[in-house]
Amino acid sequence: MHNLYSTVASVLSPASPYAADIGRLFWITFWISMVILVAVSAFVIFNLIRYRDRGQEGLPPQTHGNMVVEVTWTAIPLAILVVLFVLTMQTMAAVSPSSHPKADPVNLDVIAHQWWWEFRYPGSDVVTANELHIPVGTPIHIELTSADVIHDFWVPELGRKMDAVPGHPNTMLIQADKPGVYLGACAEYCGAGHAWMRIRVIAQTESDYQNWLKAQAQPHPAPKTSLQAVGMGLFNGLTCSSCHVVKGSGQPEGHVVGPDLTHLADRQTLAAGVVPNTPAELKKWLADPHSIKPGVYMPNLHLTSQQLDALVAYLEEQP
Amino acid sequence: MRQEPIAPHALPFPPLTRGWGWLAWFSTTDHKKIGILYMVTSLFFFGVGGIEALLIRIQLAAPDGKVLTPQEYDAIFTMHGTTMIFLVVMPIFIGLANYLVPLMIGARDVAFPRLNALGYWVFVLGGIVLYLALFTGSLANAGWFSYAPLSEAAYSSRPGVDYWIVGLIETGVGTIAAAVNLLATIVRYRAPGMTWRRMPLFVWMMMITSLIILYALTPLNAGLIMLLGDRLLHMHFFRANVSGGSAILWQHIFWFFGHPEVYIMALPAFGIMSEVVPVFSRKPIFGYTFVAGSGIAIGLLSFAVWVHHMFAVGLSTPMNAAFSAASMLIAVPTGVKIFNWSTTMFRGRLRMTSSMYFAAAMIIQFVIGGITGVMFASVPIDWQLTDSYFVVAHMHYVLFGGSMFGLWAGVYYWFPKITGRMMSERLGRWHFWLAVIGFNMTFFVQHILGLLGMPRRVYTYPGLPDYAALNLISTIGAFILGIAVLLFLWNLVSSFRHGEEAGDNPWDAWTLEWATTSPPPEHNFEKLPPVRSARPLFDLNHPEYADHARSSREAKA
Amino acid sequence: MTTANSSAQTGPTMNRHKVGMLFFISSEIFFFLTLLSSYAYLSGAFGNLPHQSLAVPRTFVFSLFLFSSSLTIWFAERAFHRHRYGAFRWWMLATMLLGLIFLSGQAIEYTELIRTGITLNYDVFSSAFFTLTGFHGLHVITGLVMLGSLTGLSFAGKLGPENESAVATISYYWHFVDAVWVAVFTVAYLIFI
């Protein structure tokens, strides 16, 4: 089993102009803070050593304060904070969507659910879950909402985090400078599955991205083997299709409850990042979702081994 | 200096062994006994919250931990936060203030002894109700902030959150009663001569804390009532997506309480620091007026910074900018306090007691919590680091490294007054070093985890690079800290039984509580020294340096 | 050396009871400020319902009864200071009567709303409206109980000059309940209508 989490997801390794801007502000603040911390600590420790009671007679000079000193150590931090505030305002503007007009942007609708992510690509029928493909070098304008409770979209290397608040749509920007996989997660506590609401951004060159989008816009491949055909029948006949969509399965696309499973084989993980997407793992998942992701809303349908094999064959079908 | 043996009849402890005397604890209206009740209750809940903390760290010691289910973990982190805030830090400071404020201002009793007792028992009731939910099989699990709509019946259908709401309303009512009592006591019961500018700084800070309690806890109670209405009566306040309710309104109400709450937990520790550091530096506090004044500034500003908990919500830019500025501004008066304490040590004659060790560590750890606090005031940095482990590190540096260490400084300082016996310095030194090592080991690495993208409130995590090692360090640190706390408790118990007799004023301290016996008699004082400065006992014991004669001395020189 | 004697500092003008009550009231102000600002915050989703369902002129008339009770309790307090206990009792009864008239106005309003189906859980407006006005009503009832106790004690001859602070603190509370209604009426019946 290959490691799905071998890369870092660090605020300090920015891979987008926005994350870089915030990273720079962080480092400026960090070094100012270090100067203050070192100065205060050194002063305290110096006092502890230098002025330790060694049993001298009498009392030390009883000084009560000094107005000049007080004003100084009020004014200097104030001046530092004014500088920091100006930098804060500049960085806020630099990373906000309004300062990046939609010249040639990619739009994306992100809808957070307990406990998975729905990604919709406006202008095409493409819908994915938990894994997000984006072209490199382009600002991505995200429209962020929630279907239930408050969640938070956070991919540290690509930009800020933002809450997905029901009844309060938000917009935010991300961008990836280089192709690669970027890890993120839901950052707002949202219930039992909060830990397993991971995000995986796959940044691709423009042409790779367009190819991917074209492939995704196709319906799910039609069954080629009899096992796959049985699987499609089960998908429609059992209750799967009342929560999940597979385009091309013949069922009407209804209300979104669970992730869209069209082209499931394209994805790297199952259950929003818990396990790698392999037929064996999918079989285990379908057999008992709660053992893999406790608290998940997907019910255990108590399927037989044959039913599991057929469903796995259909869902994991390659185009 | 009088050195009288401890008179048994004067002890504020009714007999614990013989007959029905212990029942007196249930009916007492003596502020000292109620103070002790508060502190003992808080210590009990400190044990509960500490065990919850260790369970959290056990579960997170390695990736894909399987010790707790997510439902259990969620309940435990919810109750850890709720317990430590509402049942430990707030009441332990209220208890300390209950005991000390009347003594420090030279009063025989508090303004409303019976209201005071009522406040304590209502607070206890709230604590019991919070945990009574256990018997329904579902502790509250929506977080100590219980964000709607997760805390609404649609997503938390079991009764844990209802118990949480009712319990918090009760602790809130009890705390408000305690605050009204403290305020009326401070305003009306000061000894002759004790003007505002001669009042001990601990009393100053408790006065500001009590005012913050009055104006922060009623909004919380109003919000809790609305949430309960939503859950039980199907009202519509915070039910976004359903009927025009607003999830964000809950956050505004909660953080309008929630940020002042941080100062309810920090200002009393500031007050302790402002007593302990001068006494053990053998000098008056540097800049009394500025320490008191910066406390007022913090109290006022604490009500104007709450939106910095909501920068990621997606509010308007002007709103974010205004609250960013206010949040940065509150660092200035806080810094003034830090500078004044450390300058009080400068050219002093530092007696390195356990109390002073804790005070010194508090300054440095609190600075770390303070500078990361400024980072969260900077909106874009907050956008990256909020809701990550960086916040967990930040707030524990403020509340544990700051408030708790400050409290420990205060306990070692005032234990002799309260019990008549000294705490063991040897155990105190072990307690100190294990606490410093354990605390910093637990929480310092969490800064790095946050920077590496680890969200908070997760019951488990995948093994991203360095996550396993850093989390393991944190867990080991937590157990070291746990041992430190056990040593502290052992020190309390063994010193209470066998500690050296303290006498009235073992530290040659200068505020009025040291002018009476240790422990003080029921009516507190036989006689009071005249109050002509902020250090009445110092003036009495060191007439050649007396503060009140300062201007005439300087004029001569 | 001076003797520690707290009672020496409790002057006649501002004793502990009055100070305590004023602190308590200042805390209560923040309770109502929270309910009021929540009402304002949610008002965007109210639609036309407040305008359709609230009887502004009638409530204004009932409000006048509550407002005038601040005057009668002031007369009651003045009579008490002058040891004219008969007058005191009559002014107290008048105050309570005015409070009861106000409450009956609220009862009429609630009955009408509930008859048209606008109950506590009808929508976001009804939730906010009943909570805001309901908590004010509870405070009026609390005030009436306290006024009633004072009046009863006075009729029983158990209220003398030594109870000056009891009369004063309860009168503070009553003025506060009155002032809260000024804010509630302004917000619910005038601004967000």
Image (cartoon, coloured by chain):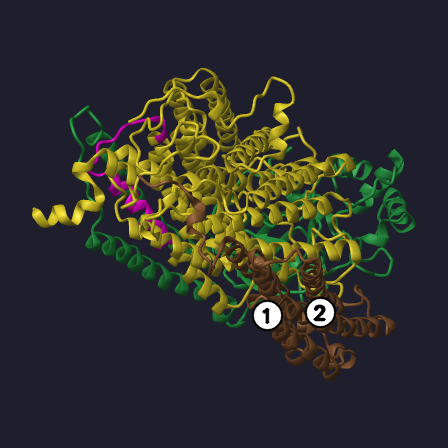
Chain colours: A green, B yellow, C brown
Separation of disc 2 and disc 1 at Cα?
A: 13 Å
Q: Where residue B530 sits in the image (x, y, percent)?
A: 30, 42
In the rendered structure, which disc, 2 or 1, sits on the residue that comes first in sequence? 1
- In the picture, residue B201 is in which quadrant? top left
Give the residues drawn in magenta, as a range. B331-355
Q: Where residue B156 sits in the image (x, y, percent)?
A: 74, 48
- In the picture, residue B78 is in which quadrant? top right
Say which element carries label 2. Answer: helix
Residue identifier under label 2: C93
| Disc 1 crowd, CA 10 A, few/some/many (<14, 14-19, 20+) | some
Q: Where residue A87 sits in the image (x, y, percent)?
A: 36, 61
Q: Nearer the viewer, residue B319 or B517?
A: B517
Magenta segment's dominant SS is helix
Q: Nearer the viewer, residue A148 or C88?
A: C88
Task: Point out the residue furthest to the bottom here.
Answer: C57
Residue identifier under label 1: C79
